[in-house]
């Protein structure tokens, strides 16, 4: 199932799943987003563990549901697989209360 990132300001702007993600994507060092087993799998590069204590989460576009991303690695690539947000949802990353400007959705 293909995955796309859309600007929350202009949903007609299809972006590649790798590249300049900006804000929460950049801070979280997102490397890839894929759909697996009906849920989202987000792959991150090693991150600053101290910075991560400020809070990284993934949420539905309408904000009605979210889940914290609490596991991370400062030395190797790591992943977060959503447990409540399905791959049919449009989701956002949130870092330190700031929601990403790009939404993840299937196409």
Image: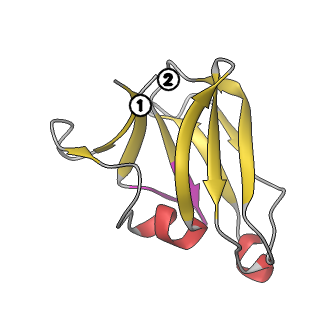
* Left or right: residue 59 compared with residue 106: right
Indicate which disc residue 67 carries: none
Coloring basis for residues: secondary structure
Label the magenta part by its dominant secondary structure: strand
Q: Nearer the viewer, residue 44 or 85?
A: 44
Residue drawn 80% across and 63% down? 72
Q: What quarter of the picture does the C terminus occupy?
A: top left
Q: Determine the image quadrant of residue 8.
A: top left
Q: Which residues are magenta?
A: 93-100
In this rendering, the count of numbered labels is 2
- Residue 94 in the image: x percent, y percent? 55, 55
Q: Decide: marks 2, 1 in contact (CB < 8 A)?
A: yes
Q: Is residue 99 magenta?
A: yes
Residue receiving disc 1: 105
* Left or right: residue 35 compared with residue 10: right
Report how far apart the C-alphas of labels 2 and 1 lie in the structure. 6 Å
Establish if 45 lies above or below 18: below
* Comes first in the chain, label 2 or label 1: 2
- Residue 19 in the image: x percent, y percent? 37, 63
Q: Is residue 59 magenta?
A: no
Residue receiving disc 2: 89
Give the crowd class for mark 1: few <14, some 14-19, many >=20 residues within 10 Å: many
Q: Nearer the viewer, residue 60 or 28?
A: 28
Establish if 55 lies above or below 80: below
Q: Determine the image quadrant of residue 53.
A: bottom right
Give the crowd class for mark 2: few <14, some 14-19, many >=20 residues within 10 Å: some
Residue drawn 50% across and 23% down? 89
- Residue 42 in the image: x percent, y percent? 62, 46
Q: Determine the image quadrant of residue 12.
A: top left
* Left or right: residue 38 compared with residue 81: left
Q: Secondary structure at mark 1?
A: strand
* Left or right: residue 13 compared with residue 80: left
């Amino acid at each position: 199932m293909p995955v796309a990132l859309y600007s929350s300001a202009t949903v007609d702007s299809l972006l590649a799943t790798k590249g300049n993600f900006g804000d929460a994507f950049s801070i979280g060092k997102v490397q890839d987003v894929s759909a697996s087993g009906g849920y989202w799998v987000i792959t991150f590069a090693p991150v600053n563990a101290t910075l991560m204590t400020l809070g990284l989460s993934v949420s539905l576009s309408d904000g009605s549901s979210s889940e914290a991303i609490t596991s991370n690695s400062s030395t190797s690539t790591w992943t977060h697989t959503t447990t409540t947000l399905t791959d049919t949802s449009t989701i956002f990353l949130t870092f330190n209360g700031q929601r990403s400007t790009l939404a993840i959705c299937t196409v």
